[in-house]
Image (cartoon, coloured by chain):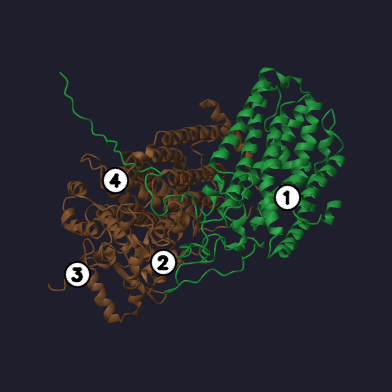
Chain colours: A green, B brown
Amino acid sequence: MTTATERSVPKPVFTDAEAGAKEFPDSTARRFNYYVPQKRKQTHYEDVTVEVQPDPRHYLAQGWLYGFSDGRGGYPLDWTVLKAWGSDRPEPVRGPGSGGKGYEWPAHGWHEFRDPNEEWELSLYRYNANVVRQVGQNVEAARRSKAFGQWNPNWVRFVERHVGAWMHVDHGLGLYLFANANRRAPTNMHNNAISVNSMHRIRAAQDLALYGLTLSEEIDGFDGSAHLDAWNSDPAWQGVRETAERLTAVDDWCEAVFAANVVFEPLVGELFRSHLVQHAAPRNGDFVTPTIVGAEEYDFSERDLRYTKAMFELLTADREFADHNKRILHSWLADWVPASIAAARALQPLWSQPDAKPPRFEDALDSAKSRFAGIVTDLGLETPKELAQ
Amino acid sequence: MSRQSVARAHQKIQELSWEPMYHEPVSHYGTDYTFRKAQKKDPLKQVLRSYFPMQEEKDHRVYGASDGAIRGNMFRQVQERWLEWQKLFLSIIPLPEISAARAMPLLFRTVPNPELHNGQAIQMIDEVRHSTIQQNLKRLYMNNYIDPAGFNSSLRNFQNDYCGTIGRQFAEGFITGDAITAASIYLTIVAETAFTNTLFVAMPAEAAANGDYLLPTVFHSVQSDESRHISNGYATLLMALADEGNHQLLERDLRYAWWNNHRVVDAAIGTFIEYGTKDRRKDRESYAEMWRRWIYDDYYRSYLVPLEKYGLVIPHDLIEEAWNQIWNKGYVHEVAQFFATGWLANYWRIDPMTDKDFEWFEHKYPGWYDRYGKWWENYNRLSTPNGHHPIVAEDVDYQYPHRCWVCMVPCLVREDMVMAEVNGQWRTYCHEACRWTDVEAFRPTYQGRETPNMGQLIGSREWETLYHGWNWADVVSDMGFVRDDGKTLVAQPHLNLDPSKMWTLDHLRRMDPLLSPNVLLNEMTDEERNAFHAAYIQGGPAGRPARTDA
Ligand SMILES: [Fe+2]
Ligand SMILES: [Fe+2]
């Protein structure tokens, strides 16, 4: 015998609460009305990003509620010395009967920045999942076809030592420069773009480390820890290391992002990845390493540099502070260009290590410099004289 | 990747970190905690090679469900009573999420353990995920739900509304002040470990009961990242406990974080679950029952108490007191009643309670009707404009409360209200624990010990101050909570969308001006203030003024 006790579950009810069911004030007002889009129409990216991080200069009526020990809360504009128009407008003062309104949105120029990559949840996971899948498949295909067996001993030494050393740059900058900077910028658009940049670098570091793990298993005598020795004590790497460490020590978040993505990456990162590894590998029978290093190259040149340029273009063309910003950016160039060129030059011995040599170091450096000069010019800045070093 | 290969991969990526030889990374954030370098293992061993595809797969499910909901006309079955409260909830929650992302670097230099930094960076990007996926859900509601008002102005409203301001603590507390207090104790040990279950599990279940299965899809996906974050916090907590000198600070921070989370989260989520639902099955769990299970049993008994043996001083008294507030002092009911009293200053519609609701409340919370029933009958009676004022300006045996300077929820359990004079200003607090937070915890010394890195409470913390002496119509216009005809309010004390039944600025124009309780308090003489306090704590429950005839 069975007893039919009715299960207790909520019952569906017809409510007709869907869009368009009735007409009344606001019944068709179906767009976020608290910001002005960059182009004519609001994008999906803007809708999920803009204004999530508030600003006391427009809507944050009661101000920030929790501060550091010095009494400052939120995202102070002076965490960088660069300025966007309106940066000097004071925060509205509140008191009895003051009301809660601030300046008209956007209140200052920082809020005009949009990430041209339109990175948000959906795009960032789709992109990075594709990269790790592709990298994994490339390595797996190479393993099955015994492609690593084609490598000559000198090339094995080169990969274990020098390709491996680069993972430390990625990891250090990913965490202590980019992830660190995601707390520093005055808008959600900046900080989200920076956090995505951070994940590119950390992922690239892990891509290289895990590639090393596979190679240790596939190639007899591959020293999976040689990268540590190169990073810790090879004189060729100490210039890169010192510069990378100095980058993580920068206090000003704009300077950190600028020095890393506008100066260091084109002059050192691309020099190493594109002009050394990508050119030397095929000549030494290695068609796999370029796909891994190439993924990171693509991250930088197609995505991270792209948002960085959009970010600084706004500042060098700012209607109020263009000159102020350019003056500072030029001083940063004067500081970081020589440091980066010195780091690049210290890497020169690497060019002679593989059996089949890549194109000459000086030619590679010249290409890197002209690429860098192009970026600087696009930003409306002068090429620094230190580039001749 | 197989489990074994993940373990090997994780082992390998430990080779990535290095000690600086030439320059120390910048140190932006301070803490009064001390840590010894220790190799605490990252308990979850997350490697990006498996992490990114895993998250992408979760996304497929979420976005597949979103498409399905629209194709399947989900909004024909959604309860408006429920979705209106989402205008508040989904305006608040993307900020705490993104603030959690921003909080992660506070731990880099202060917790000297590179293995944990990896997990923190992944948490950072998880939180970017949570924030944008929630914004996306809100956008979907705006586009497909009958009444987009309040969704369409969400992030402006949230930032200038007093409820938003209460909720904002649940974000700003993560990113400022002492780095460990904020990013570890307040964020991970209390907010995530204790309260995300009510936020992301209990609340979605209620959404589903109200015809909305998208909220559960999105929030369960969010919650599935939470166990990793909880582990990050646990590892940091064990490191902090290893140093005796930290125990006093841990005790302070657990007290502050526990109490503030209780005040803020229970106010909001309790109201959504109890007053935002149409599901009045007698066997559905009340918020109090859920709280007992998720927070008291799972968090307090199973997570916190076992840490006592490592020297953690647990605020047993405040945990029992939070339960006492919820069960005996009607905390959630008092808050819901206040939100409904002030409906006109908000940006969502609040449905009156019906006999069916009354019956459920009486069943779950015996004695409810005697306390709150009359008031809700008045709310119902005054819900459509008919020559009278909004309920806040009518005589319904309700005394407009003073605000708590710390948690910014008003002092609703009247008997608990305390006052203090701080920096020349008289402040009211909802409870002794909130007074302690302001007067003792958030100070540069604590129990005689220097705490130079402790944060400060800042801002214009009483909303009414800003509008002291203003006409209500101007207040609502100033905040922008007006629909596109230029006069109908976004907020309404009912769900009827017939324009002739909706309140407009013209109705508010006739009311007496808004007065700030705190400004008035500071205009009193000592004698008046003492008399005021004595009467205030005689008031309640349900906001009833003290009887003067007795
Ligand atoms: Fe989260
Ligand atoms: Fe309070």
Mark 3 lies on residue: B546
What residue is pinned by disc 4?
B277
Mark 2 residue type: Arg
Dot 1, crowdedness within 10 Å: few (<14), some or many (≥20)? many
Residue A262 bears which disc, if any? 1
Name the chain under label 4: B
| Contact check, label 1 and label 2, Cβ < 8 Å | no
Q: Is residue A30 left or right of residue A279?
A: left
Classify mark 3: helix, strand or loop: loop
User: Image point 35% across, 39% down: which residue?
Assistant: B76
Mark 3 belongs to which amino acid?
A: Ala
Q: CA distance from mark 2 to mark 3?
A: 26 Å
Query: What subunit carries mark 1?
Result: A
In the rendered view, tell whether residue B490 sits above or below residue B2.
below
Number of numbered discs present? Answer: 4
Residue depicted at 28% across the width and 50% down the height? B275
Q: Nearer the viewer, residue B367 or A110?
A: A110
- Residue A245 visible in the current orientation: no
The reply, left or right, for residue B311 in relation to residue B356 is: right
The residue that disc 2 covers is: B461
Q: Amino acid at mark 4?
A: Thr
Q: Nearer the viewer, residue B159 or B450?
A: B159
Asked if the beta carbon under badge 1 is closer than 8 A to the nearest atom of ligand 1, the reply is: no
Query: Residue A389 at x, y = what percent?
Result: 86, 51
Rendering coords of residue A48 (x, y %)? 52, 47
**Front of the two marks 4 and 1:** 4
- The quadrant in which residue B200 appears is top left
